[in-house]
């Protein structure tokens, strides 16, 4: 199994990020609990360990952040950044959103999602090549989450670009945070929220302003404006990122597996399975981090309190112990659970149902118009971030 070279994993190393799976395989076999001395973190890579760590929110806490750089800076996270909260605050805030992001409500958006897909894809019919990300992957999800939140269409591009810029890093470098935590203030949404206070509408911002809930102290109240701002920013960023990356990976992986793509063209009922397999095979978020609140044993070793643990979701998704021949893409795979790409436990992604509907409809509409394509990998470019992994540009050639 060993290549003869010393085993080394570094999430900031560009050449590893370009194709992390050979290193992930070695980690699972040679060092299922791995310690990186340079950046001072532990990594778990096997499915069973990653799932167990995600489920244990008392030991592996989220309130120090879910990104290694945030944990290391030990900066306070403002209330409302529910993805970086622990119970009981997280339970209270998550409860506000659970009533909105139900599978039934997300499925009800299908016709609007399909309209956005047509709006992006119809003008491309007849061209011999286009950038799947610029022309579609970055456009459709932004329109959907913008519609849900109530962000004016003319402002959506600028907000998406700011969200992208917040995640971007210099190649091989960690993310930088300001002392004011600009990343999670939601200040750019303040004017929209002030407007919605006096001009309610049928959108998520209005729902957030009016939602009553019981907070962590047992007090019945509404969200503060600051909390609504932060909720809106987190939802806008997450709503753009996941599906944008998913569309890019579907474009690349299906170009590499034309026989399976042909099956989807001939039998669209297989498309939901293809979406799930793409999520397993190439997750948008390859890892998530947690702060260790107490000594814990993993793989027979003690990880001390105060450590940072990186849970390698992308590695767990390909663990042969859970997914036979895990490095093989197979739209007919039926293993349960399908993957850990949306997390697990109390921080499982609230937007998973929306991402699944968007991914399914997007692939249906792409295949209707473009049943065959190749990818110009020489001109494709992975985004430079330390948090998500996906394509910044993905030129495709229509056949």
Image (spheres, rainbow, N blue to C red):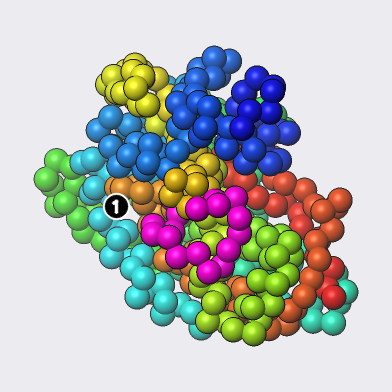
Q: Check residue 339 for magenta coloring.
A: yes
239 left or right, relative to 373: left
Q: Is residue 147 above or below residue 35?
A: below
Q: Position of residue 135 (x, y in %)?
A: 74, 66
Instruction: Write the residue at 50% across / 47% down.
Output: 320
Q: Check residue 393 for magenta coloring.
A: no
- Element type at marker 1? helix
Q: Is residue 181 visible?
A: no
Badge count: 1
Q: Is residue 169 above or below residue 366?
A: above
Residue found farthest to the front: 1
Q: Quadrant of residue 102?
A: bottom left
Q: Position of residue 130 (x, y in %)?
A: 82, 67
Mark 1, Cα crowd under 10 Å, few <14 / some 14-19 / many 20+, is some
Question: Residue beneath label 1, please?
Answer: 94
Q: Is residue 5 above or below residue 284?
A: above
Q: Position of residue 39 (x, y in %)?
A: 55, 19
Quarter of the picture containing the C terminus is bottom right
Q: Is residue 58 visible?
A: yes
Q: Which residues are magenta?
A: 324-341
Q: Quadrant of residue 152?
A: bottom right
């Amino acid at each position: 199994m060993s290549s003869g070279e010393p085993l080394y994993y570094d999430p900031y190393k560009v050449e590893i990020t370009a194709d992390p799976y050979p290193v992930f395989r070695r980690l699972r076999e040679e060092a299922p609990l791995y310690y990186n001395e340079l950046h001072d973190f532990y990594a778990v890579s096997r499915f069973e360990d990653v799932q167990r760590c995600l489920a244990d929110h008392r030991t592996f806490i989220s309130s120090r952040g879910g990104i290694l750089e945030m944990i290391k800076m030990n900066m306070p996270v403002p209330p409302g950044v529910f993805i970086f909260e622990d119970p009981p605050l997280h339970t209270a805030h998550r409860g506000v959103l659970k009533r909105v992001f139900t599978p039934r409500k997300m499925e009800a958006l299908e016709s609007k999602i399909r309209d956005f897909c047509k709006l992006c894809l119809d003008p491309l019919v007849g061209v011999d090549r286009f950038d799947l990300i610029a022309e579609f992957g970055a456009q459709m999800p932004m329109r959907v989450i913008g519609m849900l939140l109530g962000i004016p269409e003319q402002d959506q591009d600028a907000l998406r670009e700011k969200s992208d810029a917040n995640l971007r890093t210099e190649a091989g470098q960690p993310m930088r945070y300001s002392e004011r935590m600009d990343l999670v203030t939601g200040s750019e949404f303040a004017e929209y929220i002030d407007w919605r206070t006096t001009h309610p509408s049928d959108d998520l911002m209005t729902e957030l302003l009016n939602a009553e809930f019981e907070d962590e102290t047992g007090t019945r109240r509404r969200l503060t404006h600051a909390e609504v701002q932060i909720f809106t920013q987190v939802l806008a960023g997450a709503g753009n990122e996941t599906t944008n990356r998913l569309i890019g990976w579907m474009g690349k992986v299906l170009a590499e597996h034309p026989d399976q793509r042909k099956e989807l063209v001939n039998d669209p009922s297989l498309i939901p399975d293809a979406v799930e397999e793409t999520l397993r095979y190439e997750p948008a978020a390859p890892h998530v981090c947690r702060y260790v609140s107490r000594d814990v044993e993993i793989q027979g070793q003690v990880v001390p309190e105060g450590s940072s643990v990186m849970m390698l979701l992308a590695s767990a998704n390909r663990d042969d112990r859970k997914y036979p021949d895990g490095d093989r893409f197979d739209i007919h795979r039926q293993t349960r659970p399908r993957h850990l790409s949306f997390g697990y436990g109390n921080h499982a992604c609230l937007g998973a149902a929306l991402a699944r509907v968007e991914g399914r409809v997007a692939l249906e509409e792409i295949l209707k118009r473009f049943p065959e394509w190749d990818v110009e990998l020489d001109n494709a470019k992975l985004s430079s971030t330390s948090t998500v992994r996906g394509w910044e540009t993905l030129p495709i050639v229509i056949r």
